[in-house]
Image: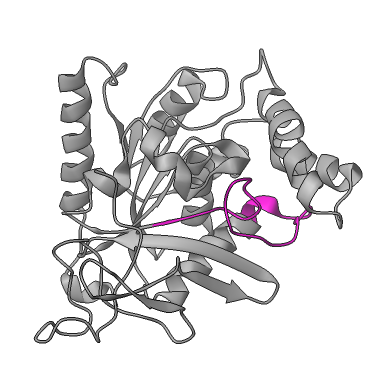
Amino acid sequence: MPFAARTVSPRGPAGRPAGAICPESGVNDMIADGDSVTDDPVTGWETRAMPFYERGNIRIRYEEVGSGFPLLVTPGGGLNSRVGNWPRAVINAMEAFKDDFRCITMDQRNANGGESAGPIDVDDPWGAFADDQLGLMDHLGIREFFFMGYCIGGCFALKLMERAPGRVVAGVICQTVGHRPENPDVMHSSGRDVWAPELLGRRPDLTMATIEAYLHSLYRRNPDFVYSVSRDFARSCLTPMLVLPDDAPAHPYQTSVDIAALAPNATSTVYPWREPPELKTRTTNEVRAFLRSHQPDESAAQ
C-alpha cells in the first residue's frame, strides 16, 4: 500500500510520546505551528495537511515517513520531479526504505502537478535546487543525511555533494540524466515542450524568453556529463556513491559508467537490473546494504 502522507499530533492517543512513530501510518506524530489540524474519523488522531517550508519567496512541499538516519529521496520526472511520481517509480523509495531510514521527499521547485514554487533562477538553476534541498534539511533540523536521486536527481546528487560535502554522507544515483552527444537537446526539448507550457499557463509572471534562458543554463551552459558539475569535480569527490545505470534517451548508460569510473568511492550495480523481479529485489537490497554500511552514529543526525 502507498506510504502514509500525513503526520499526527502529540495530542493523540494517551501514552504515546510526542515524536513517536504511529504504527498505523509509520510517520512521526509531530505537528508544526501553523499547520491546519483535523480529527481523523477512523483513528481519532489529529492530522494535518501536507507540510511546507518557506524561505523568502520560495515554498517547498515535502513529506516524510519512517524513522532512523535521514534519507532525502527525489523522484524522477525531470523538471516535473514531484511526490506524486513515487507510485510509478522503478523502486518506490518511500515504501522500500521506510522501515530502515527516515525517508524525506519533496516536490521540486515549479514542478507541474506539485505544490512547490519559487523564482526561475536563470543564473544558477542547479544551485537553486540544491539550496531548496539543503534548506529543507535545515528546516527539519538535519545536518547529515543520505541522498538518493532518480533521473534528474543524479544531477541533484552531485551538485549537493559539491555544495555541501560535509553533509551528504553517501549517495545513490538511480537512472541519472546526462548529456548524450548524439542527441544533445533531449533534456532541453523536454523542458521546452513538456514542462514549460503548463508552467507558463499558471504563471503569468513568466515569459518564454525567461524559460529559454533557464533551460539554456540547465542544459547548454555545461553540455557534458551530468550538467550540474564537471568531470573534474567527480574525480575529486570522495563521497561514497552507488550508481544504478539505465539506458534511455534522457538517461545515457555512458553517464552512469563515467560517474562510477571517475568518482573515487563510487561503485555500480549490475546492468540491466530492473528485470526479472528477483534481480530488482536484489538491487533494492544492495541499495539498503550500501546505505547501512555508511550510516554514522545515531547522534550524528541532529
Left or right of 283, for residue 147: right
Q: Which is more toward the observer, 185 or 208?
A: 208
Left or right of 292, for residue 75: right
- Viewer can see residue 104: yes
Residue 35 is situated, as x and y percent measured from the top left of the image, at: 46, 79
The residue sitting at the left extreme is 15
Quarter of image, res 213: top right
Residue at 31% x, 35% y is 91
**Residue 112 magenta:** yes
- Viewer can see residue 165: no
**In the rendered image, which quarter contains the N terminus?**
top left
Region of the chain picked out in magenta, as a range = 105-127
Quarter of image, res 267: top left
Residue at 27% x, 27% y is 269
**In the rendered image, which quarter contains the C terminus?**
bottom left
Q: Is residue 233 above or below residue 299?
A: above
**Residue 110 magenta:** yes
Residue at 66% x, 52% y is 110
Residue 41 is situated, as x and y percent measured from the top left of the image, at: 27, 69
Name the magenta segment's main secondary structure. Answer: loop
